[in-house]
Amino acid sequence: MHLRRLELQGFKTFAKKTVLEFMPVTGGQRGVTAIVGPNGSGKSNLADAVRWVMGEQSLKLLRSKKSEDVIFSGTEKRPRSGFAEVTMMLVNDDENATIDLPEVVVARRLYRDGQSEYEVNKQPARLADVILLLAQCGIGQRTYSVIGQGMVDAVLSASPAERKEFFDEAAGLRVFQLKRTQAVNKLDATRDNLARSDALVREIEP
Ligand code: ATP
């Protein structure tokens, strides 16, 4: 799986629609893209956009105080945006991939009134679907897919439990862990429903 394109509109410094194309694999060689620019020009905002479209919920990791802080806040010349949108396109060029889609397009949109939307390949999706799909693509939300400043140090000094999370993701276990969590939640909900129906039966049995 490789990142092919990132589209931003109304996200932090990217008021107007901005499209970044990343180098495809050519002749078996993978490209490296470097983004350079003066301080404060929005380089880290691009990394934030990747985290955000992958469903990141931590405001701290997104360097924000409120969710709507990711929406372009306006300048003297340009009014603020009504929504922020990021679309990430991944191409599936891995022979051993666990999914059979040629490409995966994930989008996230947030409006100023708090309304939030996710899409997977242009279809409305839930956050849980996005996280599961990305895990199937071998991309984890919080581990080594996006390596932020200071993270290398954090990995080197991580506790064995924290380091295990890294290896779990690299070994492709995340998807099973997510599915197990979803199954456990469903079982819990079913147990609650059973308890409620038992109580109802006891009430009306007489
Ligand atoms: P450095 O090289 O200093 O790390 P950088 O190029 O990584 O800088 P970023 O941290 O990505 O820069 O961008 C910071 C800029 O983004 C700040 O000027 C900040 O005002 C601006 N910014 C952040 N959120 C918004 C927003 N919602 N609307 C408009 N501008 C924003």
Image: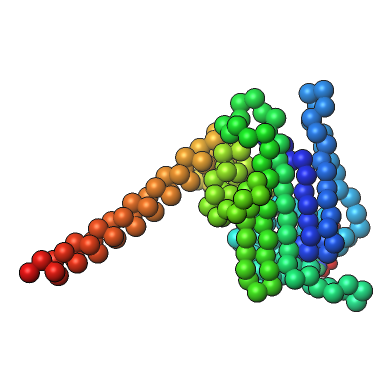
192 in relation to 129, above or below: below
Report the side of 174 relative to 1 (left or right). left
Q: Residue at x 77, y 48 (%)?
A: 6
Question: Could you say which is closer to the camera, residue 190 or residue 148?
Answer: 190
Res. 157 in view: no
Report the side of 45 relative to 92 (left or right). right
Q: Answer with the quadrant where ligand 1 appears in the image.
A: bottom right
106 in relation to 99, above or below: below
Q: Which residue sits furthest top?
A: 27
41 in relation to 93, above or below: below
- Corner quadrant of residue 14: bottom right
Q: Position of residue 70 (x, y in %)?
A: 72, 66
Q: Residue at x 83, y 48 (%)?
A: 20
Question: Could you say which is closer to the camera, residue 198 or residue 185?
Answer: 198
**Colouring scheme applied when the structure was drawn:** rainbow
Q: Quadrant of the C terminus?
A: bottom left
Q: Which residue sits furthest left?
A: 206
Q: Position of residue 77 (x, y in %)?
A: 92, 74
Q: Quadrant of the N terminus?
A: top right
Q: Position of residue 142 (x, y in %)?
A: 61, 50
Q: Residue at x 67, y 28 (%)?
A: 94
Q: Residue at x 55, y 55 (%)?
A: 126
Res. 172 in view: yes
Count of all numbered marks drawn on residues in the image: 0
Report the side of 50 relative to 176 (left or right). right
Question: Could you say which is closer to the camera, residue 202 or residue 131?
Answer: 202
Q: Position of residue 89 (x, y in %)?
A: 72, 44
